[in-house]
Image (cartoon, grey):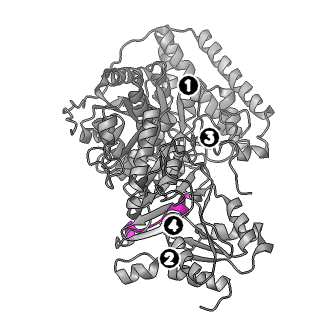
């Protein structure tokens, strides 16, 4: 049966289902147990699974990430929650030097099946240290897989797949989008809502059937013919909004949601560009050596002859993110910036 | 539902001056292992000089009594994780001199197929979780290995070893804190050889008696003479008994000395010749050999036979390494992901 669900509840369902299925899965992090999660993602899990499997840690990201790595090397399947990926910087030694390298260093003798998850990206006026994205930092590192997604159904299916996966995986969620609702109760309709805003999207319905989404596969959120807009995480919503604007002017945009950053599904992007001949990348990370650069490199390498215009990317500004609302507005990608870029690659006067 | 942690009694006592007397077989076992490690590393240094071995190479010479006294005190299923000065611990764990030497050579017959080199030996069959190259990174990892033992309900512990340099890392304090709070079965051992690369313990902190670091967490802690395998063995038995009773971690500061530099490229100009000699006078291999002879636990002939056998074994290991092949270039893409069809960018 199709139903409504928000991202927060969908992620909890994923962890709960996998913990019921496999005794070796446990959740640890700051405030995950008695406080029910800083963002309530793990609400009620302590009650169901007990303190052995839902574990409050002290504020010691390096330490508890490393305990997770050791536990994973010794046969368990930890889910390590960071209150935000900004704090996970303290744990990068364990993620990059250890989780990612264990299989290679041991020549396959020790695997490290661990999930590091938490919110990333801007979330209102949180200023410089609490607004960063980490997809590019982590996806740069072989040995890791990186997922960044806010669609409630797909995020649930990806988290379940990640918990079952034998490789170390970093999952980027979104503080603000934990409240993003997905409604698939109306036949043929798939609607996101957040506050007063709604977005129509394509994809599979949220049902009571078990949801497993393959890691490494992008999805088309809006089918179109004139231009391809590649996006991920909450930038996917900005892209859909831009597509709605463009539709009013008779421009048909195809919106791709990468969902997985590493490995990247270049095939879906290439096939779309072969159809539209134009590509925009919307990426909340900084422009320098970011995910958008990776997408753009690959498309010029694999589909050069199909491009009718240079690729344009819309990133966060090449600056730290300050506090004032005007500066936040200026910093982030938005539908206006995307529409402008689309018109540029379509050689349409705006 | 906050967990109430009972205040733990802290042991400040140092190892008794006179250790328990052990059997002839025990002393011979320690002697053999220490001599094997010594001869293996002397040969490794020689081969490094001939450029057969490359990369970083940190030898354990002088510290062998720890590897010996450690292994004899553990039980089946106990795990060990340590840092990059690890040849001795790995040989004690049961990695063969052949597999170890071939690894130093970077050959495909090495313990990790030539992928780790001197710093990264691993052996899953012996629960040897490596050789970690980041100072102190193995402290939380060892704590996590112990976490898994407790989670699975075993009686096993994880020996988590590190040097005096690593004891200044934040990772140690985060790990000590969580291990004590959760009563994890972890035995922390700091092999205090006096120097973090070229910086003496005295120059890195106001707290120079490293076992005292455990006290902040009410962790039972003691200082051990690391130049004697019997003293190490006894301290580890005592610590392991405490840990296996479910009372949580234990911390041993084992005082030792490395005769060589931090790595092969270090001339060790930060210490005096006299200081090195002082320790060489109480060298664990030499002293154990002397004890075997003085106490008539072994004859000169028996010692000679042991030495010859070890030298022959090391010679065979070198020949094995020499005659093995380097890994094929296609191996580069193996063991990066468990996923077999991972789409690497090429």
Q: Nearer the viewer, residue A51 or A305?
A: A305
Label 4, label 1: how far apart the Cα atoms are: 56 Å
For the residues carrying marks 1 and 2, which lies nearer the camera in this image? 2
Name the residue carrying label 4.
A200
Label 4, label 3: how far apart the Cα atoms are: 57 Å
Q: Name the secondary structure under disc 3.
A: helix
Chain containing the residue with disc 3: B
Using the image, tell me which numbered label, if any, was put on residue B126: 1
Name the residue carrying label 3.
B118
Q: Position of residue A272 (x, y in %)?
A: 70, 67
Residue found at x 39% / y 42%: A27
| Disc 3 residue crowd, few under 14, some 14–19, many 20+, Cα 10 Å | many
Residues at circles 2 and 4 in contact by the CB criterion of under 8 Å: no
- Where residue B115 sits, quadrant-wise, is top right
Q: Position of residue A67 (x, y in %)?
A: 42, 41
Name the residue carrying label 2.
A333
| Disc 2 residue crowd, few under 14, some 14–19, many 20+, Cα 10 Å | many
Q: Nearer the viewer, residue B302 or B58?
A: B58
Label 2, label 4: how far apart the Cα atoms are: 20 Å
């Amino acid at each position: 049966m199709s139903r409504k669900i928000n991202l927060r509840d969908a992620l909890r369902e994923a962890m709960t289902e996998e913990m019921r299925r496999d005794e070796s899965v446990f959740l640890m992090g700051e405030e995950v147990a008695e406080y029910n999660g800083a963002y309530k993602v793990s609400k009620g899990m302590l009650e169901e699974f007990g303190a052995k499997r839902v574990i409050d840690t002290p504020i010691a990201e390096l330490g508890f990430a490393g305990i997770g790595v050791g536990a994973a090397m010794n046969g368990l399947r930890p889910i390590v929650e960071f209150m935000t990926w900004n704090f996970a910087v303290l744990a990068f030694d364990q993620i990059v030097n250890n989780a990612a390298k264990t299989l290679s260093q041991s020549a396959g003798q020790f695997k490290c099946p661990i999930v590091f998850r938490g919110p990333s990206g801007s979330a209102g006026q949180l200023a410089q240290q609490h607004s960063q994205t980490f997809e590019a930092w982590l996806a740069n590192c072989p040995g890791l897989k990186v997922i960044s997604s806010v669609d409630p159904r797909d995020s649930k299916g990806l988290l379940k797949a990640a918990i079952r996966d034998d490789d170390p995986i970093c999952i980027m969620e979104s503080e603000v989008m934990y409240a993003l609702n997905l409604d698939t109760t109306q036949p043929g309709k798939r609607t996101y809502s957040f506050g007063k805003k709604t977005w129509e999207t394509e994809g599979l319905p949220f049902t009571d059937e078990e949801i497993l989404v393959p890691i490494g596969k992008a999805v088309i959120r809006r089918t179109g013919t004139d231009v391809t807009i590649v996006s991920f995480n909450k930038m996917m919503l900005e892209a859909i909004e831009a597509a709605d604007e463009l539709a009013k002017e008779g421009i048909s945009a195809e919106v791709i949601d990468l969902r997985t950053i590493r490995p990247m599904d270049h095939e879906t992007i290439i096939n779309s560009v072969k159809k539209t001949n134009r590509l925009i990348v919307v990426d909340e990370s900084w422009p320098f050596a970011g995910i958008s650069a990776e997408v753009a490199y690959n498309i010029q390498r694999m589909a050069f002859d199909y491009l009718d215009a240079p690729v344009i990317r819309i990133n966060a500004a090449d600056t730290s993110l300050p506090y004032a609302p005007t500066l936040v507005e200026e910093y982030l990608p938005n539908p206006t910036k995307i529409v402008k870029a689309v018109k540029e690659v379509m050689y349409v006067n705006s | 539902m906050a967990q109430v942690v009972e205040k733990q009694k802290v042991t400040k006592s140092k190892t008794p001056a006179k250790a328990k007397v052990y059997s002839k077989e025990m002393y011979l076992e320690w002697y053999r292992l220490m001599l094997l490690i010594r001869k293996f590393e002397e040969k490794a240094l020689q081969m490094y000089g001939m450029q057969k071995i490359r990369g970083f190479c940190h030898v354990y010479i002088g510290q062998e009594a720890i590897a010996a006294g450690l292994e004899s005190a553990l039980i089946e299923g106990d795990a060990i994780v340590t840092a990059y000065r690890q040849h001795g611990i790995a040989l004690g764990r049961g990695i063969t001199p052949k597999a170890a030497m071939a690894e130093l050579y970077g050959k495909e017959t090495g313990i990790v197929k030539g992928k780790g080199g001197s710093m990264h030996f691993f052996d899953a069959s012996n629960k040897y979780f490596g050789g970690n190259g980041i100072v102190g990174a193995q402290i939380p990892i060892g704590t996590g290995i112990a976490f898994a033992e407790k989670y699975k309900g075993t009686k096993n512990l994880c020996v988590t070893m590190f040097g005096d340099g690593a004891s200044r890392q934040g990772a140690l304090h985060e790990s000590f804190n969580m291990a004590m709070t959760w009563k994890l079965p972890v035995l922390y051992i700091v092999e205090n050889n006096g120097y973090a690369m070229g910086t003496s313990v005295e120059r890195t902190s106001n707290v120079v008696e490293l076992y005292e670091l455990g006290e902040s967490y009410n962790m039972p802690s003691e200082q051990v003479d690391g130049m004697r395998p019997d003293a190490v063995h006894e301290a580890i038995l005592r610590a392991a008994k405490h840990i296996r009773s479910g009372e949580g971690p234990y911390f041993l500061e084992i005082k030792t000395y490395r005769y060589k530099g931090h790595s092969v490229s270090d001339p060790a100009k930060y210490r005096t010749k006299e200081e090195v000699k002082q320790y060489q006078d109480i060298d664990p291999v030499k002293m154990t050999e002397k004890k075997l002879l003085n106490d008539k636990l072994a004859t000169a002939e028996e010692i000679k036979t042991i030495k010859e056998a070890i030298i022959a074994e090391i010679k065979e290991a070198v020949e094995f390494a020499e005659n093995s092949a380097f890994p094929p270039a296609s191996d580069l893409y193996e063991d990066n992901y468990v996923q077999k069809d991972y789409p690497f960018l090429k």
